[in-house]
Amino acid sequence: MDSMPDVPPSLDLRTLNSGSPIGSTKEAAVTFDFHGFRILARSAGDPVRVSDITTDFSLFTTEPNGRHDLEIVFRDFGSRPTLPRLQAVQHTPRNVVYRDGDRSFLDYGGRALTVISDGGRRCEIHSDDRHLAHEAAYLTVLSHVGAHFDRSGRTRVHALGLETGGRAVLLLLPGSGGKTTMALRMLQTDGVRVLSEDSPLMRRDGSIDPFPIRIGVRPGTVLPEVPASMRLDIERMEFGPKTLIDMKAFESRLSGPVPIGAILIGKRFTAGASRMVPLPRRAAIRPLISDAVVGLGLYQGVEFVLQSSALELFGKGGLALSRLRTSLAIARRAEVHRFEMGPGIEQTGDVLAGFLRDFAARHAGN
């Protein structure tokens, strides 16, 4: 679990001046570009921290150009600042949030401290725990990138996003509902490509943008042929261990932006065979409100972006209304089915693969 992988050759190793915060003369750095939002992550003395976060978002790495919207700096726990007496302004399952002027402090159980400053453009993560520092960085990226997507007219939806026949198919399922299992199966199915295992991006023009970030599976899951260098075992704060798969392992099976084609509303059943049941388009509205407008199942990082309460998330800029309009635009252009999922995993996968094959055939040439 604690073995250190080799540093990927794509990381930028730069020489620093002596006296760097971790006492090393080398710095590892990586730059990401998320549909126009650029993030620089760097660490002096411990390139594994940068390697870990690169596993999450490898397909968004880009060349540095001196411009970034957010800088994440990994530091050791001993370099954390001494805080004055501050009252907690927010509690989440992961951390306690304090504020002092324009700086925010996120305390992860006394084992890590994240400091947000410079108007949210700089994030310092102080921790000696590799896994905790990684998770804090991952959540930081998701929170800022999610806010950027909302500003740029992209709405994340908690779904498995697939492409077949040049159209997107969204499978809406609750957390732990089987999206990862279906994603791994579809990655081995001819004629199917993946947009995102967890959170494709909906646009008001009816298109779906890809958001292919890491896939996380439970330890012991039988994986397709994935090189060891593209797997990473992690420990998480709330949900236990997982094995991450770098999406570069499936780069040839990933899709670019495509128009929406179908929405599948997944429902689990204790017995019986899996099947697809056609529904009217309006049946997709309620699930999309849950999985896109409210964003259940999506990490939204309210501790990073709010000043007082969760109500501000929907108060600033009519965010809920914007997400709703996008969801309605997607629902109007999609055929809708209820995917009744029985207990047989193989048969369920066969039903989904069969639907996608028939869907592509029906829309061929359109």
Image (tube, rainbow, N blue to C red):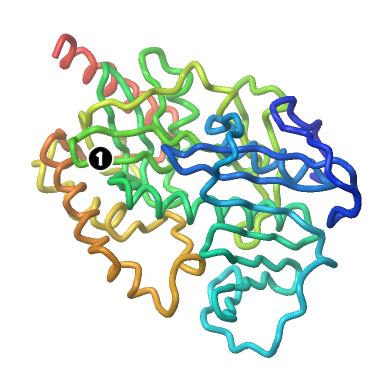
* In the depicted structure, whether residue 115 falls above or below residue 139: below
Amino acid type, mark 1: Arg
Q: Nearer the viewer, residue 153 or 130?
A: 153
**x and y percent of residue 117 in the render?**
59, 66
Residue 270 seen from this side: no
The answer to whether residue 42 is left or right of residue 255 is: right
Q: Residue at x 77, y 69 (%)?
A: 80
The C terminus - image quarter: top left
Q: Nearer the viewer, residue 63 or 59?
A: 63
Q: Residue at x 81, y 31 (%)?
A: 6
**x and y percent of residue 1 in the render?**
79, 44
Secondary structure, mark 1, is: strand
Tell me the residue that label 1 is attached to.
Answer: 203
Q: Residue at x 10, y 47 (%)?
A: 282
The answer to whether residue 175 is left or right of residue 316 is: right
Q: Write down the quadrant of residue 160 in the picture.
A: top left
Q: Residue at x 54, y 22 (%)?
A: 250
